[in-house]
Image (tube, rainbow, N blue to C red):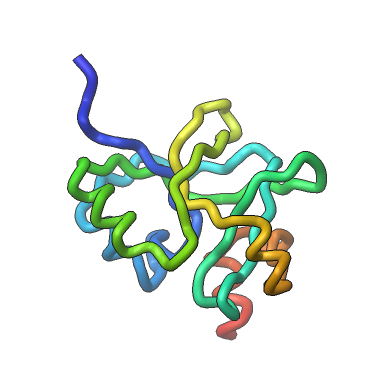
Amino acid sequence: MTSPNKRVFICGSALRGQPDHQNLQSAEFIRPAKTQPIYRLHAAENGWHPAIYEVTEGGISIPGEVYELTQEQYEYLLANEPPHMYPGDVVLEDGEVLTAMLYPRELVEQHNWIDISNYGGWAAYKAAVVS
């Protein structure tokens, strides 16, 4: 019997301590995690939210958190994501494949949004630009 719940990798503004954490409602925190080093991280919409996408070279490992969401919590999360974000697969360090909110690379490049891949994750970037 399979669970109707969904495990999701969170690596942006819904992390613990970030302003959109309430979008997870009472989802169960499972563990901290990192992706395999095959992604880039940008600050989209002038730092309003993160934008991640997969690359074939020059990728980094993005830190985040794994949560287990009910179908209702997942639908709420999707409904509250910024425009253009979409659910897609990410590969974690340990090889587990989970859903995360991705962003079209074409839009990142079109708008030339800042690459924050070397900050150590979304929370570290936000702490650096606020302080």
Is residue 103 left or right of 70 when viewed as pictured? Answer: right
Q: Is residue 91 above or below residue 127?
A: above
**In the displayed image of the protein, which residue is found farthest to the top?**
1
Q: Quadrant of residue 16?
A: bottom left
Q: Residue at x 30, y 56 (%)?
A: 77
Looking at the image, is 117 positioned above or below residue 114?
above
Name which residue lies at 70% across and 41% down: 37
Q: Quadrant of the N terminus?
A: top left
- Residue at the extreme bottom of the image, as rendered: 131
Specify the quadrant that holds the C terminus.
bottom right
Side of 129 relative to 24 (left or right): right
Q: Is residue 131 left or right of residue 99?
A: right
The image position of residue 22, as x and y in percent, is 27, 65
Residue appearing at x 44%, y 40% in the figure: 99
Q: Quadrant of residue 5?
A: top left
The picture places residue 126, in percent across and down from the top left corner, at 55, 74
Instruction: Provide residue 73's location: percent of width, then percent of height.
Output: 22, 50
Number of numbered labels in the structure image: 0
* Viewer-closest of 25 and 33: 25
Of residues 84 and 28, the one nearer the viewer is 84
The quadrant holding residue 6 is top left
Residue at image x 44%, y 66%?
83
